[in-house]
Image: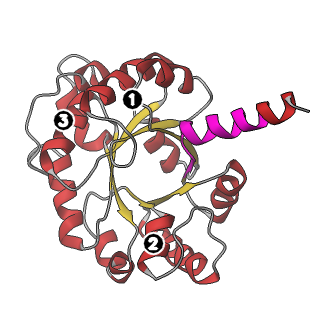
């Protein structure tokens, strides 16, 4: 199975990404049928663990969305395991230096381009019999998160690391690191200026930029701004918004 997100990026198109915090295959199965281009299992701030990640992938797989994971940290064991489970993209938090970005690439790719161990226990289902190892290095998206002042200061060096396919902005932590209130859907001119800087530098290098958003309206705005991946909240947030509205309407 080709990486549909990577194909869209090659064509200059943006994608809309779903986000899974709930550790349940059934909710993943239902959520993945809602039109997302990709769906990301959140192992950092969601309540997902490795087994629930695998279960979510199993629920998602029949519906053609590109499966991705936000890993909890820059650590080779978990990165290798989520890739072996079938992740087509790894989003890694708190990448602040070129050295950390290079390590992320190393952990995500097979030799000779990396140090990932061979053992794609589920990923072979996606890659086809005997072909996964031949295509994985080209198909898997390596996406460091840019979410601190240090990362901004080292942005160009991070983007120049071979093997980086995109970056992903964490607006809350980015604002926090500059002494501002952590929040999604930022309107602060300074932070919006940082977004412009990131878009400029990624565009120069043919690298995609993604961002986490709180609402579909802000997600649409970010795609129009030039981002190539926009996440809309997560399934918990969307469920709660719909439930609150339902209760409000029911009570008149």
- Is 90 in the magenta? no
User: Which residue is at the front of the view, 22 or 41?
Assistant: 22
Residue denoted by label 3:
81
The residue under the point 32% across, 30% down is 53
Residue 24 point in image, percent of width and height? 41, 23
Q: Which mark is residue 23?
A: 1
Q: Secondary structure at mark 1?
A: loop
User: Which residue is at the front of the view, 115 or 168?
Assistant: 168
The residue under the point 19% across, 63% down is 102
Magenta segment boundaries in residue numbering? 230-245
- Looking at the image, is 31 positioned above or below residue 111? above
Residue situated furthest front in the rendering? 251
The quadrant of the image that shows the N terminus is: top left
**Closer to the eye: label 2 or 1:** 1
The residue under the point 12% across, 51% down is 114
Q: Earlier in the sequence, mark 1 or mark 3?
A: 1
Q: Secondary structure at mark 3?
A: helix
Q: Secondary structure at mark 2?
A: helix
Q: Are marks 2 and 1 in contact (CB under 8 Å)?
A: no
The quadrant of the image that shows the C terminus is: top right
Residue 168 point in image, percent of width and height? 43, 59
Q: CA distance from mark 2 to mark 3?
A: 28 Å
Residue denoted by label 2:
174
Tell me: 45 left or right of 180. Answer: left
Q: Residues within 10 Å of mark 3 (few under 14, many from 20)?
A: many
């Amino acid at each position: 199975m080709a990486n549909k997100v990577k194909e869209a990026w090659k064509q200059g198109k943006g994608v809309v990404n779903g986000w899974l915090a709930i550790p349940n295959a059934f909710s993943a199965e239902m959520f993945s049928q809602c039109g997302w281009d990709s769906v990301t299992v959140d192992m950092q701030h969601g309540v997902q663990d490795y087994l629930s990640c695998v279960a979510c992938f199993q629920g998602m797989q029949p519906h053609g969305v590109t499966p991705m994971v936000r890993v909890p940290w820059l650590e080779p064991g978990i990165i290798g395991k989520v890739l072996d489970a079938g992740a087509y993209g790894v989003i890694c938090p708190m990448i602040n230096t070129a050295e950390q970005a290079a390590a992320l690439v190393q952990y995500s790719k097979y030799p000779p381009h990396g140090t990932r161990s061979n053992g794609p226990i589920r990923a072979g289902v996606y890659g086809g019999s005997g072909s996964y190892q031949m295509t994985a290095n080209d198909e898997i998206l390596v996406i460091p998160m840019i979410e601190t002042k240090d990362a901004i200061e080292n942005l160009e060096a991070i983007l120049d690391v071979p093997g980086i396919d995109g970056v992903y902005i964490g607006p809350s932590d980015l604002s926090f690191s500059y002494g501002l209130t952590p929040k999604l859907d930022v309107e602060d001119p300074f932070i919006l200026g940082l977004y412009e800087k990131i878009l400029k530098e990624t565009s120069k290098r043919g690298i995609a930029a993604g961002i986490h958003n709180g609402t579909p309206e802000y997600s649409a705005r970010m795609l129009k701004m030039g981002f190539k991946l926009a996440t809309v909240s997560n399934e918990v947030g969307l469920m709660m918004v719909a439930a609150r509205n339902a209760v409000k309407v029911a009570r008149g």
